[in-house]
Image (cartoon, grey):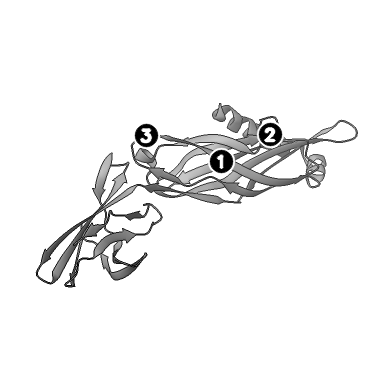
Amino acid sequence: MKFIRRALVSAIAAVALVVGPAVSAEAAKMSFDVTKLSAKNMVVSNGNCKYFDVHMKYKKSKVDSWDVEADIAGRHGSTTSAYFGNYHSPSTKDRAMICPSLEGLGKYRIGPSEISADYDDANYNSHWYARTDYTKGYFYVRGKTYASLASKRSGKTVTLTSKTKVYNPEKYGKVSYSPKVKFQVKSGSKWKTLKTVTAKKGKATYKVKTKSKKTYRVTFGQSSWATGATSKSAKR
């Protein structure tokens, strides 16, 4: 269906070019601008394709009917498009689908958009308007991450070892993930960071000297393509 719509947009643009100066003068009085494109961020924990809503805001002048097709692209390039039109209800929301197993994680772009519009003047003459709008919006598709913490004591030394993984849809499973992890200790009702360590091949280790039993955990924040996570606490 969207291929048909794209063909119609191209046809309208072609008509606008063929008609000539009279149409151009009227078209100059028309305007349609995309002012915002947006979609919610997603978290991926399996290899399934994802349906999601794309929203658009706009402003227009001297336009009777219109349609907009916004390109959607991920790390590997264009993936799909979102279609909006004033004969489509609701006109400023469309349902699209991406497949992260093919298109990857990370930052996705919405836009540029192809716009076509028409206007009937007082003499019932139709005038066409078509252009590319370069307004862009962005959303993120992140792999779900997992963190675990193991602890052991030898005398006064407590060794904390974290393991971190992320679901990678292009590999259809969990793989080792190496973020900067924070080893934390519970102090009253709050958590205090002892050390920040960059994991290697999904593993990080930190040793702390203490006589008394304390409660520890490991945590890290999100990136453009992976969520943040916090391990279960360990008392040692």
Which one is in front, 181 or 110? 181
Residue 127 occupies quadrant: top right
Q: Residue at x 58, y 27 (%)?
A: 4
Task: Kindly identify the amino acid type of the residue bearing the numbered disc 3.
Answer: Asn
Q: Is residue 153 rendered to the left or right of residue 195?
A: left
Circle 2: element type: helix
Question: Which kind of residue does numbered mark 1 sit on?
Answer: Val
**Residue on which disc 2 sits:** 12
Q: Which of marks 2 and 1 precedes in the sequence?
A: 2
- Residue 48 bears which disc, if any? 3
Q: In the rendering, at what x and y percent does residue 20 appear?
A: 77, 40
Q: Position of residue 212 (x, y in %)?
A: 19, 70
- Mark sitting earlier along the chain (2/3): 2
165 or 154: nearer the eye? 154
Gap in angstroms between the C-alphas marked 1 and 2: 24 Å
**Residue 192 bears which disc, if any?**
none
Which residue corresponds to the image point at 56% horizontal and 30% vertical from the top-left?
A: 2
